Image: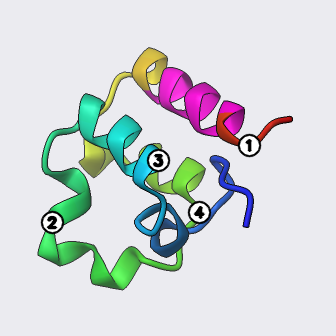
Amino acid sequence: MAISSKSKLREILEDERAVAIIDEYVPGFVSNPELGPVAGMKMKTLLKVPQVGLPKETVNEIIARLDALDAE
């Protein structure tokens, strides 16, 4: 399955490349046990939630990198 910013969190967590990208910007985010209730959310949406606390520029960088993973 192709991974992008439109992938659900549960799909992102199954892809080592995507996990590495997220972990680079938010260390420990993907191993947070409280993520269960949001596992069905699209990554793009989840990153924009204020509680995540990422600046818009960082969110845009993560989205671009996720979208580039399987863009070919």
Q: Which residues are magenta?
A: 59-68
Pair 2/1: label in front: 1
User: Of residues 52 and 1, which is closer to you in this image?
Assistant: 1
The circle on residue 20 is none
Residue at mark 2 = 32
* Identity, as a three-letter code, of the amino acid under mark 2: Asn
Residue at mark 1 = 70
Nearer-N-terminus badge (3/2):
3
Quick one: SS at disc 2?
loop
Residue at mark 3 = 18
**Residue 53 image point, x, y percent:** 25, 37
Nearer-N-terminus badge (1/3):
3
Q: 32 above or below 17?
A: below
Quarter assignment of residue 65 = top right
Q: What residue appears at the point 64 percent right and 61 percent down from the top-left corner?
A: 7
**Residue 66 image point, x, y percent:** 59, 38
Nearer-N-terminus badge (2/4):
2
Task: Bin the neighbour count of mark 1 within 10 Å (Cα to Cα): few under 14, some 14-19, many 20 and up.
Answer: few
Q: Please, what is the dominant secondary structure of the magenta stretch?
A: helix
